[in-house]
Image (cartoon, grey):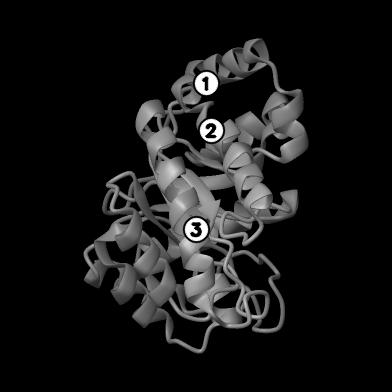
């Protein structure tokens, strides 16, 4: 399988788990030299049997995929919830995805941090107290499953509290998923400052574009983000993460990969 390597970059693409059962999906990924970032929805996890998971994982190995990642469920999943039952639910739900790691052998599991300023009345310490407990428990689960966690910025206005979370948990299993598209929408902090704050801890980066108004998930180069500049900032910070394109429409897949590869070829 001819994985694209420009300065040893690994490229993944988001793929909902059910689509991996379609030959067209697997063929498109393989032909592009791209590994899947498998998204497990809550419904998918509840319906998934051990036999089905083993069968799918084995089919991916036989197809030649050497690098893949997971994205844990995030809808109604709040690891920093103040309600203890809600927090425990979030840990249980995310742990369902982590438990599949020994079967698929992903390089890590993307997890939303779950901080939203308006929801927590802009008191990040309230979120941090609960989130630290949740991610501590999740890091232990990741240790047992021999995988890593990549905590992703979504509605975060600054990287500070995610850095504090990383420090509070203190586990080598916890790293960052830097999402410049989200940062461009929800943060006033320049994107290079995010890269500097996360530094070598950036294990994975989501790559999708937008025009500054909504989370469009456009192919790279079709929005307003300067991804070449972002990638150079990430390199300057000492990281060389997995790069995951996130097309939300099938017709955007090839344009997303081609747009990213075009940029990578310009980076010395």
In the foreground, 127 or 25? 127
Are the residues at dot 3 and dot 2 in contact (C-beta closer than 8 Å)? no
The quadrant where residue 233 appears: bottom left
Q: Residues within 10 Å of mark 1 (few under 14, many from 20)?
A: few
Q: Nearer the viewer, residue 122 or 174?
A: 122
Q: Is residue 104 above or below residue 237?
A: above
Q: Do we see residue 38 in this rendering?
A: no
- On screen, residue 144 versus residue 71, left or right, reads left
Residue 119 image offset from top left, x and y in percent: 67, 74
Q: Are marks 2 and 1 in contact (CB under 8 Å)?
A: yes
- Residue drawn 60% across the image and 79% down it: 117
Q: Residue at x 59, y 62 (%)?
A: 114
Give the residue pinned by disc 1: 63
Residue marked by disc 2: 30
N-terminal label among 3 and 2: 2
Residue 61 pos. (x, y %): 48, 19
Res. 211 image quadrant = bottom right
225 versus 94 height, above or below: below
Residue 131, labelled with which disc? Answer: 3
Across and down, in percent, residue 118 comes to 67, 80
Q: Give the answer, above or below, for where 179 lies relative to 226.
A: above
The furthest residue to the top: 51
Q: How many marks?
A: 3
Q: Which mark is residue 79?
A: none
Q: Residue at x 44, y 42 (%)?
A: 137
């Amino acid at each position: 399988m001819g994985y694209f390597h420009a300065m040893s970059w690994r490229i993944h693409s988001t793929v909902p788990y059910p689509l991996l059962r379609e030959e067209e999906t697997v063929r498109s990924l393989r032909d592009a030299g791209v590994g899947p970032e498998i998204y497990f929805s809550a419904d998918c996890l509840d319906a998934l049997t051990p036999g089905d998971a083993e069968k799918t994982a084995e089919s991916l190995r036989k197809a030649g995929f050497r690098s893949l990642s997971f994205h844990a469920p995030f809808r109604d999943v709040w690891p920093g919830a103040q309600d203890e039952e809600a927090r425990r639910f979030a840990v249980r739900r995310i742990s369902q995805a982590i438990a599949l790691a020994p079967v698929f052998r992903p390089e890590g599991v993307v997890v939303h941090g779950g901080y939203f300023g308006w929801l927590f009345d802009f008191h990040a310490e309230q979120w941090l107290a609960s989130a630290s407990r949740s991610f501590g428990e999740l890091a232990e689960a990741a240790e047992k499953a021999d995988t890593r966690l990549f905590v992703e910025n979504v509605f975060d206005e600054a990287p500070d509290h995610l850095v504090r979370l990383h420090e509070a948990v203190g586990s080598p299993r916890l790293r960052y998923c830097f999402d410049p598209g989200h940062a461009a929408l929800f943060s006033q902090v320049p994107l290079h400052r995010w890269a500097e704050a996360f530094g070598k801890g950036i294990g994975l980066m989501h790559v999708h574009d937008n025009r500054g108004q909504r989370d469009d998930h456009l192919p790279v180069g079709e929005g307003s983000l300067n991804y070449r500049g972002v990638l150079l900032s990430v390199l300057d910070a000492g990281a060389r993460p997995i790069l995951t394109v996130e097309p939300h429409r099938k017709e955007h897949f090839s344009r997303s990969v081609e747009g990213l590869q075009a940029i990578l070829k310009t980076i010395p």
